[in-house]
Amino acid sequence: MSRNRYDIDETLERHLDFSKLGRMGVYIKPHIGKMLVALVLIALSSVLSLVVPALLQTVIDEIIPQGEAGMRRLLEVSFMAIGAILLSALFSTLRNVLMAHVGQEVIYSIRRDLFAHLQELPFSYYDSRPHGKILVRVVNYVNSVSDTMTNGILNAIVDLLNIIFIAIFMFSMNVTLTLYVLAGLPILIGVTLVMKKYQKKFNFEQNNKNSNLTAYTCEAIAGTKVTEIFARQEENMNIFLRLNRLYHRAWMRMAMTSNMMSPVTELLKQMAVGLVYVAGAVLLGHATGAPAVPVGVLVAMGTYASRFWQPFVSLANIYTNFITTLSYLERIFQTMDEPVEIESKPDAVSPDELKGEVEFRHVTFGYEAGQVVLPDLCLSIPAGQSVALVGETGSGKSTIVSLISRFYRVPDGCLFIDGRDINDLSLPWLRRHMGVMLQDSFIFSGSIADNIRYGKLDATDEEVQAAARAVCADEFIREMPDGYDTFVTERGGVLSQGQKQLIAFARTLLSDPAILILDEATSSIDAKTERLLQKGIEALLRGRTSILIAHRLSTIRRCDCIYYLDHGKILESGTHDELMALGGHYHHLCTVQSEE
């Protein structure tokens, strides 16, 4: 199991893995047509914008010298320039709208597949990493990846086309001045090669620190109540500040290297413009003894020189984002590549019914390598029987019910349901026939009725209310402001722990499972409510296989068989009366509890 925590950086490849781009292509391919249209639009926009300096050169060198005779042509050229500017803006706007649509479609597809895969991953995946590091992949990373892989790639192509188009326009005007403009390219290439290594390193570092900060923030928010109970605000703030400083430091290092390209390119641009004017006005004129170059050509070449270097700034930023995107892609596809250990076989079966017979044959299980929780467990539960698992904390009770629920894979030994290997049964079919109520009763944001109906989405209002009555939840629900339509927040903030447990109990009852698992189902319910609930529990257990885990022994006295576990081994088994007569571990447990 990974020891990934909020204060431990994730391991990433130190080289650029371009194979990730091929996988990203799967999401981009359906939108290639729109991207090509966008490319044509922006190419037209760029060409039209480049026409304006050429028209300006015509005005200065050809039309203005004609005086009043050139007024008609001046108007024509002016309207042409205005038309070129408007069309350029229109094409650019259409391209932006089109690419915004493509970007959102790509985001939707990646996030859909990522979330779908996350729902298939085993509990062990979530046990081994902070939820904040998972959340940042689904939300932040996907947004950044989509923007870079759609707009970023398109902008890079456009910038390259702009460089080519501008170079063509410049060469068509004056070859010598164009060579002066291009003189700074070797310097730019050298700086880029030097900065490349540092940009990659600092981007990886910044991504890790951002992930760590997000993970801790999520954990701190989820544990706010515990923080206040133990007055841990100052300690938590110190941890947050430390992680925030590390992120700030990493971000500044990344920003410093990323922004280094901009001033270098700006300096080269200004030098190129200066060289154009100097060469045009002095050097060429001195060499030929004639006017250096026409004024219009000089003005146009100065404009083109300035525009020629601007795409390099954009390309430098795109390259920086591209490095970041590759690290994001690695994390996204790393999550998608996590093996779905618990899934149905291609030939998995879905029998007509589930009777509920459960059998463990020499099952050995541990959550981590080298750790054994259940050593060679053999346990048989006949269909329709109610059994209880008791023992000290850590004795393996919850592990047994987790394996029956197929939350984890059985690595050694066999687990049978109705005489079939549990791995041969369809997982959705098995889960539909099982009801599991955990000690931590999770309440989703929504109405109380929706939370109960979660166990059976097509249940009627009458069925929802009947389930609530059976578990003694109907009375307190009707006393709430909107009754069953009362809105509750995530984790049921307005409900007591006992109320949340009763709602979860009703949710489980409504699903009408063939195998029922109650893991400390009444731990947060007061003794009076528990006594009222006993009839509902007895009715719920009748006719179905049920497995109960409870520290309150009053809830398991009527079970058909009680198993006492210690370190994953069954030390005693029998009815309550049989185990009490035995005078062993169970007897001692009951005696200690009765004295409390």
Image: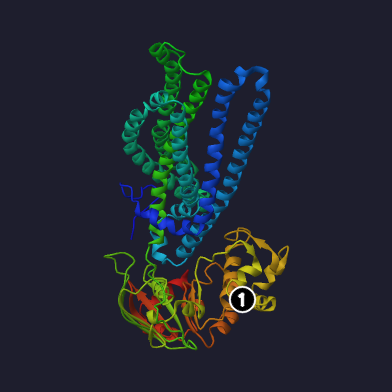
Pick the residue in front: 258 or 53. Answer: 53
Q: Residue furthest left?
A: 370
Which coloring applies here? rainbow
Q: Is residue 460 left or right of residue 104?
A: right
Quarter of the image where one finds residue 388: bottom left
Image quadrant in which the N terminus is located: bottom left
Question: Mark 1 belongs to which amino acid?
Answer: Val
Q: Secondary structure at mark 1?
A: loop
* Residue beneath disc 1: 471
Pick the residue in front: 219 or 518. Answer: 219
Mark 1: few/some/many CA within 10 Å (<14, 14-19, 20+): many
How many numbered discs, if any?
1
Quarter of the image where one finds residue 396: bottom left
Q: Position of residue 101 (x, y in %)?
A: 57, 52
Q: Is residue 318 left or right of residue 483?
A: left
Pick the residue in front: 148 or 382. Answer: 148
Q: Quick check: 187 above or below 13?
A: above
Quarter of the image where one finds residue 193: top left
Pick the residue in front: 2 or 295. Answer: 295
Q: Position of residue 576 (x, y in %)?
A: 44, 83
Q: Is residue 46 left or right of residue 6?
A: right
